[in-house]
Image (cartoon, rainbow, N blue to C red):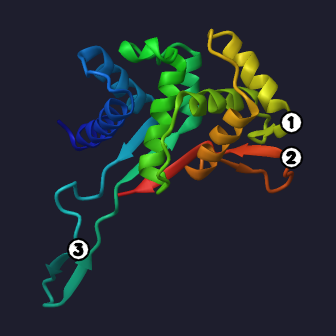
Amino acid sequence: MTEIENKKRELQSILEKDFTHLYGIQLDEEIQNSFAAIVENFATVTPPEGGFSDRMMEMTVLNAGRTSGKNYRAGNIKLDMSKFFASIVNGALTFNGAITGYIPPRYACVLGAITLWKDLYSSATVELSADDAIVLWTLWNARDDKNCVEKNKLLTLVNEEVADSSRKEITDKDLEKALSNLKKIRCIKESQSDNSKWWLSSWVSIKY
């Protein structure tokens, strides 16, 4: 495997561990391929300059007898919500496997994405659920050109969404909990310019 492939496999392992713990599912090739597709359509990996195995400062003795420190540039993982949601909408990404008996494929993909987001970008110890994925999916599809959504319209929008998936309606309490979880993992926050709206984070960059 290349360095980038190794790091993406590590990200896939995060999903495998979290989903088996949360849902008790048995991993099979179909589910593993779905996790790999989520990583591929969500994460862009730039390896450290100099490789994964040599990240420390290397002291180089110059001809003049001086020593110089050569810094290796840290690796980077970019999680891109815009790219991710576009891949679901255009049919490039779906989820196959036993979990779809509990949650429809598009929401399973979103749950995978926010699981990675939480584990890599946030120190929050929240247990994410299908409701969190549904709320983020709804927010993303309802956002304006400033990546904002009006708070007072959200419950109606969410329940219009779940009506198409044969899931039970989400209550005010369910919505409040989902929004709290998404805030804790720093996917959303109140708009700085208008506190009657939620603002969505479209990407983050994590060094390693």
Say which of marks 3 and 2 sits in front: 2
Q: Give, as a three-letter code, the residue at label 1.
A: Asn
Give the side of residue 107 with respect to residue 44, left or right: right
Circle 1 packing at 10 Å, graded few (<14), some (14-19), many (20+), is: few
Label 3 secondary element: loop
Q: Is residue 89 above or below residue 41?
A: above
Q: Are marks 1 and 2 in contact (CB under 8 Å)?
A: yes
Say which of marks 3 and 1 sits in front: 1
**Rendered image quadrant of residue 182:** top right
Q: Which mark is residue 152?
A: 1
User: In the image, residue 58 lies at what x, y percent?
Assistant: 19, 74
Residue under label 3, please give it: 57
User: In the image, residue 121 lies at what x, y percent?
Assistant: 47, 52
Label 2 secondary element: loop
Q: Give, as a three-letter code, the residue at label 3.
A: Met
Q: Quadrant of the N terminus?
A: top left
Circle 2 packing at 10 Å, graded few (<14), some (14-19), many (20+), is: some
**Rendered image quadrant of residue 60:** bottom left
Q: Is residue 40 above or below residue 206?
A: above
Q: Is residue 203 above or below residue 49?
A: above
> In front: 166, or 173?
173
Q: Earlier in the sequence, mark 3 or mark 2?
A: 3
Give the side of residue 128 with respect to residue 182, left or right: left
